[in-house]
Image (cartoon, helix red, strand yellow):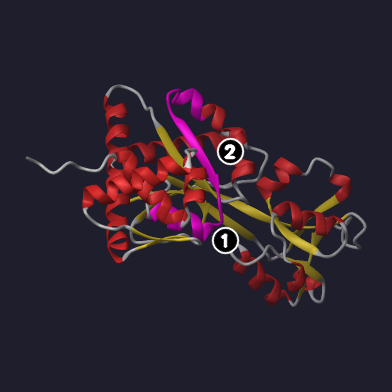
Amino acid sequence: MPTPAPTIRQLEYFIALAEAKTFRGAASALSISQPTLSAQIYSLEQLLKLPLFERSRSGAMLTPAGRDLLDTARQTLEQMRAFTDRASLLSGGVGGLLRLGVSPTLGPYLLPHILSDLHRQYGELKLYVREKKPKTLELDLVEGRLDLVLIPLPFQHPQITTEVLFDEPLKLVCSRDHSFADQGRLQASDLHGQNVLTLEAGYSHYQQVRQCYEALGANILRDYEGTSLDALRQMVVMGMGMAFLPSLYIYSEIHRPESIAVLDIDGVSLSRSHVLAWRKNSPNRGFYLRVAKLIRQLVRHNLTEAGLAFPGHGS
């Protein structure tokens, strides 16, 4: 008689507890009660004849056996999701749920311009969107917690495929009462000694912008790094310094030009490339490539005034 196999739900509970490290946190993430979670984990351990967690008042820590089985559980769950997604594709339409990760410096300023058209094209497709910093998105994609990631480069991993969508300029901005506000165009030497601001380390273009500032001799205010584009913008408005902001953010969010001035710098051009990324071995990789091409078309059509450029084309 074959040994009973764990259920998909038990594997989901096992992974959730391993990630949350507490029964309360995992139960909350799963929207179930703690007794239900405890009972399912206990049943799984009895079925496998293995203790998966060391329980204590402070939480639940994986045993060596639990650590050894965690990756296999993630792969199994990923294959089951891929199975149902593939079945939906073969049945004549795209259905089910795709888990999409986006960078917080991109998602809010891009997704509103493309999601309704994506839904119109693939009416049965549901997108579960999560915003996280790039390094977390990469880990979540590799470990199967996300299906797709929409993210700025650099983004490289041997298990990941990327499709370039578009290039986005980074524009220098200053407050309206800054001495540069009415000039429109600066020389690179104009930034020498100027106070400038950046996002905090961990965002994709942090190093790129910081290196540019250093090359121009600007004074980087490291004690005032922005935790978000909105925070960075507000510090600029308050006259704390100048900053580079992505053009999609400027296009989507800055509706009061009197509060901020957008400048060009002769001889200085910064941009970031955005990609759609997925695991190389995903059974749905052909569909993901079609989604990437559709996103590129939608961006080109819906954001013509945002100053974007596309692979193999001019701006």
Q: Residue at x 51, y 50 (%)?
A: 25
- In the rendered image, the quadrant that contains the N terminus is top left
x and y percent of residue 306 in the render? 66, 42
Q: In which quarter of the view is residue 188 placed?
A: bottom right
Q: Residue at x 27, y 62 (%)?
A: 65
Tag 1: amino acid: Ser
Give 142 or 61, whichever is nearer the viewer. Answer: 61
The dot on residue 111 is 2
x and y percent of residue 236 in the render? 82, 58
x and y percent of residue 171 in the render? 71, 56
The dot on residue 221 is none
Q: CA distance from mark 1 to mark 2?
A: 18 Å
Tag 2: amino acid: Leu
185 horizontally vs 103: left or right: right
Q: Residue at x 27, y 39 (%)?
A: 7
Magenta segment range? 118-142
The answer to whether residue 199 is above or below residue 285 is below
The dot on residue 204 is 1
Q: Residue at x 40, y 46 (%)?
A: 38
| Label 2 residue SS | helix
